[in-house]
């Protein structure tokens, strides 16, 4: 039979296991406030100290508080303190609302699509125009990936940097004329670091001039049915009074459906980090899409923000055989740019969660019939009746027939 202290010790450990579903900073906060240690570690941290630290707006964990037993021992006080802190700590799903209030949030449009069919799962003002900012780079990305697919270039092809990329401002990797990098390296800089100079370098590499590449962007947009989109840059920069790149949530969804059909494209958009190896000064690039870490199954695609365009995102996630695409265009907040970006992420995550849940209720598509070996139809044989030539006895028989 266990004494009361052992029971309480078991209870305290069980209570702390609840903490492992919370972000590590929250667990550390509880361990510090309780002030109890075991083997030199705060118990909450010791329980799962290897968990990667995530931003404090994790939107998935939501734990309830177990009741605490009553006793006059230090272990009981530890258990009660832990339980009370769990009750008082806001669930992680509400931290975004607490830190970045959705009050006053606006957006140009949203849409969620089935990536396999392009079917709309939900939409809100999906045809309203907005400036996609760096989400524009997805069209640049698509054109380069299609050229690689069609053997017009390759990932290993060298791109000699001209004067145009060095004039770009905003997010950039500092390309200098006469440097040369592979197409693959520039694509990682484009997708992870959102490098404006890399977009221009790829545009010039593929079409000779930025203007020619932008014309090709608009031609491809028309082919995809993006009827309300107009591109003026390969990178989405909104300098001066414009004109700026214009699109809608629905049009950007069509672009992403095409990209999601290319597994190699998702290798770039789903990478969380990459080392851009320039001579003597390598750059460690980190993907701007926080949902790659926060949302299970997310592997793309692109974020964007400028003062004129506000915050946008095109993202995708897979669950089993199902994949959805979520677009949030032009999200803004009175709380400023950081609040707008985090609320944009939260909205996109909610759209993907709802979309995957909706797909789960739909019947699975019927399997395609397996094609058997090809057979050549055989024409029916004609029956040929050979007419017998009359002989002597036939002639004689006819002679005496009356």
Image: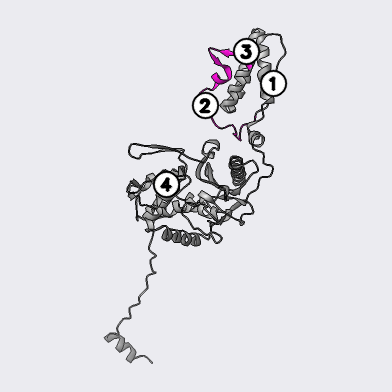
- Camera-nearest residue between 377 and 297: 297
Residue pointed to by mark 3: 9
Q: Is residue 327 visible?
A: no
Left/right placement of residue 183 relative to residue 243 reads left
Q: Are marks 2 and 1 in contact (CB under 8 Å)?
A: no
Q: Is residue 84 above or below residue 298?
A: above
**Distance (Cα) linking label 2 and label 1:** 23 Å
Q: Residue at x 63, y 20 (%)?
A: 15
Tally the marks. Answer: 4
**Distance (Cα) linking label 3 and label 4:** 51 Å
Helix, strand or loop under label 1: helix
Badge 3 or badge 1: first in the primary sequence: 3
The x and y percentages for residue 371 are 43, 55
Residue pointed to by mark 2: 51
Residue pointed to by mark 1: 84
Q: Residue at x 44, y 51 (%)?
A: 141
Residue pointed to by mark 4: 264
Q: Nearer the viewer, mark 2 or mark 3?
A: 2
Magenta residue span = 34-62
């Amino acid at each position: 039979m266990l004494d009361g202290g052992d029971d309480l010790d078991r209870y305290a450990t069980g209570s702390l296991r609840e903490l492992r579903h919370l972000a590590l900073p929250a667990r550390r906060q509880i361990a510090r406030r309780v002030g109890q240690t075991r083997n030199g570690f705060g118990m909450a941290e010791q329980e799962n100290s290897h968990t990667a630290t995530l931003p404090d707006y994790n939107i998935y964990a939501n734990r309830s508080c177990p009741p605490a037993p009553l006793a006059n021992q230090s272990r009981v006080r530890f258990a009660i303190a832990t339980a009370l802190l769990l009750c008082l700590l806001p669930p992680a799903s509400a931290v975004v609302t607490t830190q970045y209030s959705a009050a006053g949030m606006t957006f140009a449009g949203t849409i969620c699509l089935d990536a396999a069919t392009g079917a709309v799962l939900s939409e809100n003002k999906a045809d309203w125009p907005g400036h996609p900012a760096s989400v524009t780079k997805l069209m640049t990305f698509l054109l380069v990936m299609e050229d690689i697919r069609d053997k017009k270039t390759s990932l290993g092809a060298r791109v000699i940097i001209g004067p145009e990329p060095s004039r770009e401002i905003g997010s950039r990797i500092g390309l200098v004329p006469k440097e040369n990098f592979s197409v693959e390296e520039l694509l990682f800089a484009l997708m992870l670091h959102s490098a404006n100079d890399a977009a221009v370098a790829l545009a010039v590499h593929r079409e000779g001039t930025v203007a020619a590449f932008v014309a090709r962007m608009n031609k491809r947009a028309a082919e995809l049915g993006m009827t309300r989109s107009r591109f003026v840059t390969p990178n989405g920069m909104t300098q001066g009074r414009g004109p700026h790149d214009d699109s809608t949530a629905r049009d950007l969804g069509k672009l992403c459906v095409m990209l999601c059909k290319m597994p190699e494209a998702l290798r770039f958009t789903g990478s969380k980090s990459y080392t851009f190896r320039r001579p003597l000064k390598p750059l460690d690039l980190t993907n701007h899409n926080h949902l790659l870490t926060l949302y299970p199954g997310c592997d793309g695609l692109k974020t964007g923000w400028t003062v004129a365009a506000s915050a946008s995102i095109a993202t995708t996630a897979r669950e089993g055989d199902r994949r959805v695409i979520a677009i949030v265009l032009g999200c803004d907040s009175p709380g400023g740019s950081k609040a707008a970006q985090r609320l944009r992420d939260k909205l996109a995550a909610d759209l993907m969660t709802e979309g995957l849940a909706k797909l789960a209720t739909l019947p699975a598509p019927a399997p395609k019939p397996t094609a058997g070996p090809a057979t050549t139809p055989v024409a029916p044989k004609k029956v040929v009746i050979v007419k017998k030539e009359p002989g002597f006895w036939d002639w004689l028989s006819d002679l005496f027939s009356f």
